[in-house]
Image (cartoon, rainbow, N blue to C red):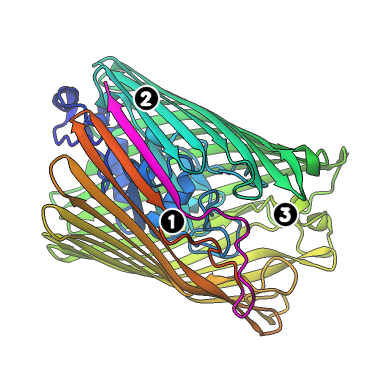
């Protein structure tokens, strides 16, 4: 449900409650954070955070798009509908979904929920739906925040951060809704939400339940059950103080088929966050909180027992003051204490502690020019045990500085240019175990923090009928680990890319969006200065990169009650330059999803969609000149569904 409220304070809250409940439909309009869901204690923070993004690139997708494209796997829907995420070959089917943003020298970006500190979680392995932690019905929007994000988010921010915004009960009055989806792949997915808000308190609660009986179609899956729940509760002590509690629980139980045998995989993920905002004055506010996430995946048949647990304490001060009639200052200073526990296969027991101080500042001149500058200093500590034995510390550096500088200027009323330079960093603790015990070998680079540096320029042109946004970037990752003779070899990975985003309202009934993403060049350099071409991490094979990624979405309002939509994704192929200079080419693919909804009543919608219309099964996994390998993937799947708001 979208809440279009332009008022502020108490008036906005009352206006929000006056809105009419409506069933969820596919929405391509730009995501806007509506003031009606922002408490007065959070208004300074919102202004400061928004100003800090003025010179950066980001793309958001509405929760309705996520819910319609893939209501179970949010990562699958996100990568096809927005910019910046690299889709490696063979991972494009409905069950998977990568999180690499712009970069190849890492294994995926960290995630943030509601703008809270970023974290990494243990990924489900083996097969079945992934990215199921948050019920899609509860998602307000997901943003791909591109470019180095170390200052604001810390670890896992080489190329960006994925940020999910959860719906708030402040936008609802006695609300309840249910969503049901059934597929020809023998899947039934049920979701429900209830929400209510008063001037004093509010709540939002959602749940999801997937029952799937594949029985070997696809050939590696027998069944999967996913259960999840989410609760977000807010209490306003006054107009100046608000406390929010967020809890998320998810359980995923795929039963896979491997070498003719059925094997059970069990994954769980929990989130608990408590935050408090307090407005000191109209220009000052503070926020403090605690964030916890624990994630665990167990694959007994392969003796895999993996767990990542995060505990983060954080506090920030926000200031929004005029320096003169023409200059506004918006800034924040804060601190963060993060402890990550990494358990792997009953062998590795590692704890990583990060302590950080940070500040992001913006000067805004006449609402025409914005200049931003941010800095973060992070201290690191490792405590690593292997088979119960304390290991020597091979941490290459125990502290780093991170920074960002940027400017955005409106050269014309509807034309805004931007430029930025920003760093990211990555603990890359996954090398423990994935790279054997190489990180403990003091002969090599040991445990080196991966640091990235991104230069970027961009321009956004707004029109009465939409917008055009173009960005060029260059990101260098230094300290990327590579296995070499039982030790870690430190590499540099440099990549340049082009991103184009278009929104076109062709008429009152027809809207298009298009996203074009291309890695223009990628080069890996070994520690001795020799060119590794596209070879990273281990072996001799290069990383396969898409020639380009193009997605086009459209919505058409046939009537006030009937809406049609479609999403087409295409890549021309993949190319990998191996260590010896040889090239491995893989075939491209096209994926098309179409659907429609009929609002039988304002609060009741019927939906239908066809997933993978062209029956694509290889998703770029086939090497040119060889026999196609469909990996047992599903082809076309038909869905019917309904949304009902009580």
Q: Examine the rendered structure and indicate whether residue 290 appears above or below residue 526.
A: above
Q: What element carries label 2?
A: strand
Provide the residue span drawn in magenta. Answer: 623-646
Q: Which of 68 and 233 is in front in this view?
A: 68
Q: Pointer 3: what residue? A: 431
> Residue 612 bears which disc, if any?
1
Q: Looking at the image, do the residues carrying marks 2 and 3 touch, with CB atoms under 8 Å apart?
A: no
Q: Distance between the residues labelled 2 and 1?
A: 28 Å
Counting from the top left corner in percent of width and height, residue 632 is at 62, 56
Main SS category, magenta section: loop
- Mark 1, other Cα within 10 Å: few <14 / some 14–19 / many ≥20: many
Q: Where is residue 262 in the image (x, y as percent from the top left)?
A: 74, 40
Residue 446 is inside the magenta segment = no
Q: Which of marks 1 and 3 is nearer the N terminus?
A: 3
On the rendered image, what quadrant is the C terminus found in?
top left
Give whichever of 36, 276 is nearer the camera.
36
Q: In which quarter of the image is residue 203?
A: top left
Mark positioned earlier in the residue sequence (2 or 3): 2
Image position of 118 (left or right of 599): right
Mark 2 highlights which residue? 193
In the displayed structure image, the side of residue 248 where residue 172 appears, left or right: left
């Amino acid at each position: 449900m979208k809440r279009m409220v332009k008022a502020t304070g108490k008036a906005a809250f009352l206006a929000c409650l006056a809105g009419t409940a409506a069933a969820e439909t596919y929405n391509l309009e730009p995501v806007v954070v509506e003031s009606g869901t922002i408490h007065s204690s959070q208004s300074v923070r919102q202004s400061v955070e928004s100003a800090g993004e003025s010179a950066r690139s980001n793309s958001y997708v509405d929760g309705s798009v996520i819910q319609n494209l893939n209501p179970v796997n949010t990562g699958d829907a996100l990568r096809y509908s927005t910019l910046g995420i690299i889709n490696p070959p063979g991972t494009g089917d409905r069950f998977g979904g990568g999180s690499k943003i712009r970069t190849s020298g890492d294994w995926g970006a960290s995630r943030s929920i509601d703008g809270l500190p970023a974290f990494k979680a243990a990924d489900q392995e083996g097969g079945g739906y992934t990215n199921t932690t948050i019920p899609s019905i509860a998602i307000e929007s997901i943003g791909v925040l591109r470019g180095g994000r170390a200052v604001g988010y810390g670890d896992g921010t080489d190329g960006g951060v994925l940020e999910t915004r959860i719906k708030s009960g402040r936008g609802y009055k006695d609300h309840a809704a249910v969503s049901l989806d059934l597929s020809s792949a023998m899947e039934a997915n049920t979701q429900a939400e209830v929400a209510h808000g008063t001037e004093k308190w509010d709540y939002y609660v959602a749940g999801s339940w997937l029952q799937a009986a594949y029985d070997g179609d696809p050939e590696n899956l027998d069944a999967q059950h996913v259960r999840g729940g989410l609760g977000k509760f807010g209490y306003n002590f006054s107009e100046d103080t608000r406390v929010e509690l967020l809890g998320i629980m998810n359980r995923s139980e795929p039963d896979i088929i491997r070498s003719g045998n059925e094997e059970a995989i069990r994954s769980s993920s929990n989130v608990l966050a408590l935050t408090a905002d307090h407005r000191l004055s109209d220009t000052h506010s503070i926020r403090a909180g605690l964030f916890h996430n624990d994630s665990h995946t167990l694959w007994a048949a392969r003796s895999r027992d993996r767990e990542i647990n995060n505990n983060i304490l954080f506090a920030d001060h926000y200031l929004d003051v005029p320096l003169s009639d023409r200059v506004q200052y918006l800034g924040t200073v804060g601190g963060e204490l993060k402890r990550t526990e990494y358990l792997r296969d009953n062998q590795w027991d590692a704890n990583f502690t990060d302590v950080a101080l940070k500040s992001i500042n913006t000067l805004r001149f006449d609402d025409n020019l914005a200049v931003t500058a941010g800095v973060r200093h992070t201290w690191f500590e490792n405590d690593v045990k292997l088979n119960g034995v304390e290991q020597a510390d091979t941490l290459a550096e125990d502290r780093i500085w991170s920074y960002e500088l940027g400017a955005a200027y409106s050269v014309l009323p509807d034309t805004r240019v931007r430029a930025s330079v920003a760093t990211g960093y990555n603990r890359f603790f996954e090398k423990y175990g994935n790279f054997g015990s190489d990180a403990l070998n003091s002969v090599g680079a040991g445990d080196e923090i991966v640091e990235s540096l991104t230069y970027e320029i961009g321009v956004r042109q707004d029109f009465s009928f939409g917008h055009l946004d173009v960005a060029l970037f260059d990101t260098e990752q230094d300290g990327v680990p590579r296995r070499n003779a039982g030790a870690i070899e430190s590499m540099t990975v440099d990549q340049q890319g082009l991103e184009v985003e278009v929104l076109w309202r062709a008429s009152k009934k027809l809207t298009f969006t298009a996203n074009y993403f291309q890695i223009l060049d990628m080069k890996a350099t070994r520690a001795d200065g020799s060119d590794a071409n596209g070879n990273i991490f281990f072996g001799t094979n290069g990383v396969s990169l898409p020639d380009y990624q193009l997605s086009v979405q459209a919505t058409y309002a046939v009537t006030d009650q009937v809406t049609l939509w479609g999403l087409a994704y295409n890549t021309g192929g993949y190319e990998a330059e191996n260590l010896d200079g040889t090239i491995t080419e893989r075939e491209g693919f096209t994926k098309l999803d179409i659907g429609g909804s009929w609002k039988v009543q304002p609060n009741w919608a019927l939906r239908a969609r066809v997933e993978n219309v062209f029956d694509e099964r290889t998703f770029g996994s086939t090497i040119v000149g060889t026999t196609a390998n469909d990996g047992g993937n599903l082809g076309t799947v038909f869905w019917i569904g309904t949304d009902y708001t009580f």
